[in-house]
Image (spheres, coloured by chain):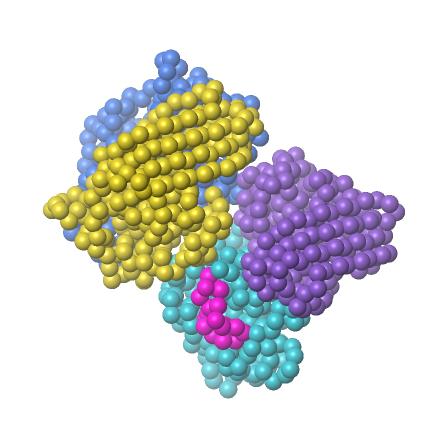
Chain colours: A yellow, B blue, C purple, D cyan
Amino acid sequence: MPIAIETQFAFELPSPTDALLQFEAARIPEQTILETDTQVTPSEHVARVPAQENIGERLLVRAEGALEVSYSARVDIARAVSDLARHGAIPPHEIPGEAVEYLFDSRYCPADDFQSFAEAEFGGTSGGARIAAISDWIADHFSYVPGSSTTETGAVDSFVARQGICRDYAHVLIALARASAIPARYVACYAPGVDPPDFHAVAEVFLADPAKSAGGVWQLVDATRMACPSETVKIGVGRDAADVSFLTTFGPSTFRSSCVRVTKE
Amino acid sequence: MPIAIETQFAFELPSPTDALLQFEAARIPEQTILETDTQVTPSEHVARVPAQENIGERLLVRAEGALEVSYSARVDIARAVSDLARHGAIPPHEIPGEAVEYLFDSRYCPADDFQSFAEAEFGGTSGGARIAAISDWIADHFSYVPGSSTTETGAVDSFVARQGICRDYAHVLIALARASAIPARYVACYAPGVDPPDFHAVAEVFLADPAKSAGGVWQLVDATRMACPSETVKIGVGRDAADVSFLTTFGPSTFRSSCVRVTKE
Amino acid sequence: MPIAIETQFAFELPSPTDALLQFEAARIPEQTILETDTQVTPSEHVARVPAQENIGERLLVRAEGALEVSYSARVDIARAVSDLARHGAIPPHEIPGEAVEYLFDSRYCPADDFQSFAEAEFGGTSGGARIAAISDWIADHFSYVPGSSTTETGAVDSFVARQGICRDYAHVLIALARASAIPARYVACYAPGVDPPDFHAVAEVFLADPAKSAGGVWQLVDATRMACPSETVKIGVGRDAADVSFLTTFGPSTFRSSCVRVTKE
Amino acid sequence: MPIAIETQFAFELPSPTDALLQFEAARIPEQTILETDTQVTPSEHVARVPAQENIGERLLVRAEGALEVSYSARVDIARAVSDLARHGAIPPHEIPGEAVEYLFDSRYCPADDFQSFAEAEFGGTSGGARIAAISDWIADHFSYVPGSSTTETGAVDSFVARQGICRDYAHVLIALARASAIPARYVACYAPGVDPPDFHAVAEVFLADPAKSAGGVWQLVDATRMACPSETVKIGVGRDAADVSFLTTFGPSTFRSSCVRVTKE
């Protein structure tokens, strides 16, 4: 049952400006790109580079004036999804080198600030059970309010406001996971069921693999409860939203519009 | 002319706690470890994992009570050092994928906030010339004041206070470099000449390689002016100090003491 | 030569909400209200209370739905204006009790953070000469950019961005004055020459009175250079913009529009 | 049953510096100063000015080198104390002018950020009942941890950390009260039962007076539960700790020691 994606967005660069774009479904083993079509307003320069962790690609663009992006794809997902509670914690001293960096504080997720709260509120749990408790706590205490946050909003602000959008839910979950010594990263994605329809974001946490005696696996978690892991199309990953914005510009820009449509076929 | 390093530090963990340590000279082509000796108080668990970008290693420790680390090494440095002004900028659309992440905002370096200042103050320069101008501006406007900052201090705070220690100088330089679309990262290091003697930190920026027609090289920059690139022993790199602290603990800890001695033989 | 003011603004309260409004020219000795007319959409409750320092009045309103305010006035100004440089500093131990609170950190003006910068940059000056130097420094280093700041923006953010609107210029000047041990407050006002026309804000600093051997006087300073003290109609004063917003609501609200016209007759 | 206070504190000013001190029991109707003795190291200048709201006095000092303060007093308290739940809310449009400023955001209490949380968590309550609910919530969710906060710590930080000292408890309560449209201020005080013994701080909220048909009264609330209103000796009040620190210096200073002893006779 493939997922169909159609998205358009437009922005304006008043002078020649460099921009990074990341909006296409990543070609990774757990999801197969059946069809894909990307149209970008012709620009002075366009290059493609592998994105973080080799998940997806970024478009590096230098352009001026109106820029429009139109993208469509059909994606088949074959992702192993299992109950969070079945995943134990990986003791920090067994965490592989490449996952360690996802324990650290990042721009929007200053996890250190949350250590005492995480211990007080979720101290009796560990691993996947703790992530499930954190996700439930967020779902119970937060309201999804489009327009209530900005690109300056971080996990601390959202924790205080108890409201936000997908990005904010993911930041709070990531901060609380890292404060619990569980590696956590940010996943830009597409998913049906996101309401109102938009680019989506969820968290991914690194937990013990119940099928193996050692090593770990990344597991998707959506504290907004809008996206099922089995229907989530990954675009890219990063420390937090600073790393996987669909649009980053190195100079002034004006965002014009965006439209995202994701459906199960 | 090797660099000799001797360092001890001690801290206390009131209950069994996971900690990350990163304090050894990295084994990388540009520096040869002639001798090395690491002594750590025996702990419940100790593991070694490669650190970020495969530069150096982290010790993952689980321990309780007093922990002492004693480290000595002799290191020979063979690093290509050239005048910053000889390095042009790499247009963002030509930046290789693995350097792109060093353009993004991180915990202590919210570069986006500095875009308008960077353009206003350094707008006429680019590449290595801009980095030299930024480094000069920091050196001219900042005072090196041990004790004036904490682990919560970020580039914005330091920019306002106009004072700090090596870590703060590096954060401001990194933020201003990224705000100029130049990839920049944080380098924990040892260097003779650091006064008062301590762990040191500098920035590293990604610029065009004057010896080649394409691609780039990382160049060390120390806005404190205390460390020469040719005498700087790298421990590790990261987005900012959040990634390469010599000590990160996942729970309460008390820092007892540290002593660092770095000499040219 | 009276100043004529015409202003309208409209906002919407989705549910019954308390709001504070402060937008009328203050009746104080230094300015005479020749004519005045205030129209507010009839509301559940409206009360008037004296505003801070008895300068101006606030309207306390409880209302729901669309609210429109229409205000016009003609004001004659008779304010003693003198060259800042003629005003010496009042030693802090001679500052009268009622001015002391304007030395303290406030929501948008955390002056303490600016002490080292203020001393490094303006250390050779004091009193009115220092205020003039601060005002010149801001005028030289900042750009007036409507839309570049929000209600969350404080003096630290503006100092880093080096841009903002009148409110931001005033906040930075106030923070730097207080960091110099000079009492400083925020003045909401109307002034001709504000471009684009809008509600305006300037700072007011407490300095020695050159005409007297003791005591001090409040002096207006506009680092944006758009308003002359002799043509500035005061609405109210406070620690910073948190105290004298023309509209503060205790619940969600949507701002619809505003229009301000100020002319010299 | 008088309260006996003995306090000493010492600090050092490396160069001639202005400082504000506020540490004496206020002479106000609700508390009678039976005996008092203040000793301060002779300084270049010392002046006394009335403190905020005419509650207590500040010492304005200009001094250099070591400064020691020694203070003792016996105070009789005759404060009307009543159950919070008996106090209704004063509708914002009936709040008297002099209390309105305690609705606004201040340095450490950015109340606006807490509006959505306050409404979600305490939405069913109002007036004294809401304050009691807020105080209970803080007491239930926070840990009193000496050393866990600094002078930079504000209500947002404390709300995230869920720990702090008296100052932090007061800031969170004040922020949540203001977010509920209830005027709230910070009270520096002495109280027996504070553990470890130290300067203390509580909040004061403005509620309807159950004994009268109109007007309001300020009521003390201590979310740490360590001080009874009937045994609390007020030093001074302000928007938050920025206004009533026992020591504020306008330049570098080193705090040496403090010792506070408060007993019921």
* Residue D24 appearing in the image: no
Viewer-nearest residue: B95 or B66: B95
> Would you say C110 lies left or right of C237 here?
left
Q: Is residue D202 above or below residue C157?
A: below
Q: Position of residue C153 (x, y in %)?
A: 56, 47
Q: Position of residue B81 (x, y in %)?
A: 36, 20
> Would you say C55 lies left or right of A91 here?
right
> Would you say A60 lies left or right of A56 here?
right
- Residue B192 located within the stretch drawn in magenta: no
Quadrant position of the C terminus of chain C in the picture: top right
Q: Is residue B186 above or below residue B249?
A: above
- The part of the image, by quadrant, that contains residue B213 is top left
Viewer-nearest residue: B12 or B22: B22
- The span shown in magenta is D117-135
The residue under the point 46% across, 53% down is A145
Residue occupying the far front of the picture: A265
Q: Is residue B12 above or below residue D188?
A: above
Give the main secondary structure, helix, strand or loop, of the magenta stretch.
Answer: helix
The residue under the point 36% across, 60% down is A140
Q: Position of residue D183 (x, y in %)?
A: 58, 68
Residue occupying the far left of the picture: A213
Viewer-nearest residue: C219 or C147: C147
The residue under the point 53% across, 36% down is A256
Residue occupying the far bottom of the picture: D1
